[in-house]
Amino acid sequence: MATLTAMDIPWAGAEGGNVGQGFPTKKLFIDEVIPRLNLNCPNPEFRSSRSLSPASVNTSHSSSEDVSMEGLEDEETKRANRTLEMVSLWICHQIRLSSSSLDPVLFELLPYLCQFIGTERDQDVSQSCLQALCYLSACILPKTAIQPLLDMVKRIAMSESYKTKMSMLEFLQVAVFTNFPSLVCSPVYRDQVTFLTTSLLSDPHITVRQKAAKILGGLLHSGFLSGTPLTNLLCDLRGRVRTKMTRGGTNKRFRKEEGDPGAQDKLNHHSGILGLCAFVEAFPYDVPDFVPPILMELSTHLNDRQPIPMTIKKSLQEFKRTHQDNWQEHKTKFTEDQLVVMTDLLVSQNYYA
């Protein structure tokens, strides 16, 4: 099948046409197999989509469950899994055999591939899906394929399965750096990648938040964000961690909001801490001008609820590890008051408690 669909190469130019006239196309093949696949993890983005038929969406799983935890399989599910394994192998052969650039229609299979990574029930299917995702993420994309990729990734991010989102983030990380020049030179693409990454900093599952923070750190380290976008992002993250103030009383003075913060407020607060820690860890052998104020801000949150102190302490440990060899040079970037705080953070016994 991969040999046949490898002939599906469109002509360049306004006239259009196809090199393999009469051969089956990739779109025809994908439209044929998608109704045979199961989408095991609930995702509101795909319930009314034509590319993912409602009959193929299995919504019997709760948000905390994963396909790897299911026990018995019926025959229909087994056939769907075998079909997915076949499609995954087809993607790998298609990319190896074809001399044309990647067809955006292949991204319609991403939701099915991401849901099976890391499952324990069917290792063969899981490994095939992983291999297909590796091939797809390492492709240099034409301009016409970048926006379809970002659109599909944003839809997958709405999944209720944390493993699906983890797989999507792994895929996005490789795809972004494989196509770094095309993405970083376009403010539209750059903003979409940044928004997706920072939005997942507030995900309900902590492993997704931590993975998003790691990717954000990589984007900062590589220079994907600079100038005004970087400043705006830093302001947004600081706004998430700072205490909200309300004006009240007879003198109309500002005071802290009272009451226990809700679950979403806690997630937003932790997302800001993760983002600020990503800024600190993104520059392991340098101290940009904005890093000392970030460290001072983080030091004021060491007594917050967990997992915020744990997140900050890990970041401070990493900062100390990467900067201690040239600390005599790096400490010139700090004021005297900031150095006193840094000494308390990195040397005091309470820090290691």
Image: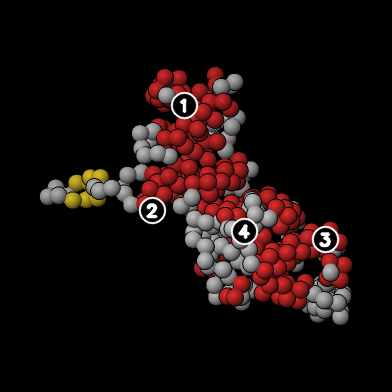
Taking depth in this image into account, of 75 and 51 the one nearest to the observer is: 75
Q: Amino acid at mark 4?
A: Gln
Q: Locate residue 59 relative to residue 80 in the image: left or right.
A: left
Q: Residue 263 location, x and y as percent?
A: 37, 52
Label 1 crowd bin: few (<14), some (14–19), many (20+), radius 10 Å: some
Q: Residue 297 location, x and y as percent?
A: 40, 36
Query: Mark 2 and mark 3 in contact (Cβ < 8 Å)?
Result: no
Based on the displayed image, in which of its 4 quarters is residue 112 positioned? bottom right
> Circle 2 — which element?
helix
**Residue at image location 42% in from the left, 20% down from the top:** 348
According to the picture, the residue beneath numbered tag 1 turns out to be 334
Is residue 86 visible in the rendered image? The answer is yes
**Residue at image location 76% in from the left, 73% down from the top:** 29
Q: Which quarter of the rendered picture does the N terminus lie within?
A: bottom right
Q: Which quarter of the rendered picture does the C terminus lie within?
A: top left
Question: Label 3 vs label 2: CA separation?
Answer: 44 Å
> Circle 4 — which element?
loop
Q: Earlier in the sequence, mark 1 or mark 2?
A: 2
> Circle 3 — which element?
helix
Is residue 101 visible in the rendered image? The answer is no
According to the picture, the residue beneath numbered tag 3 turns out to be 93
According to the picture, the residue beneath numbered tag 4 turns out to be 115
Q: Earlier in the sequence, mark 3 or mark 2?
A: 3
Q: Amino acid at mark 2?
A: Gln
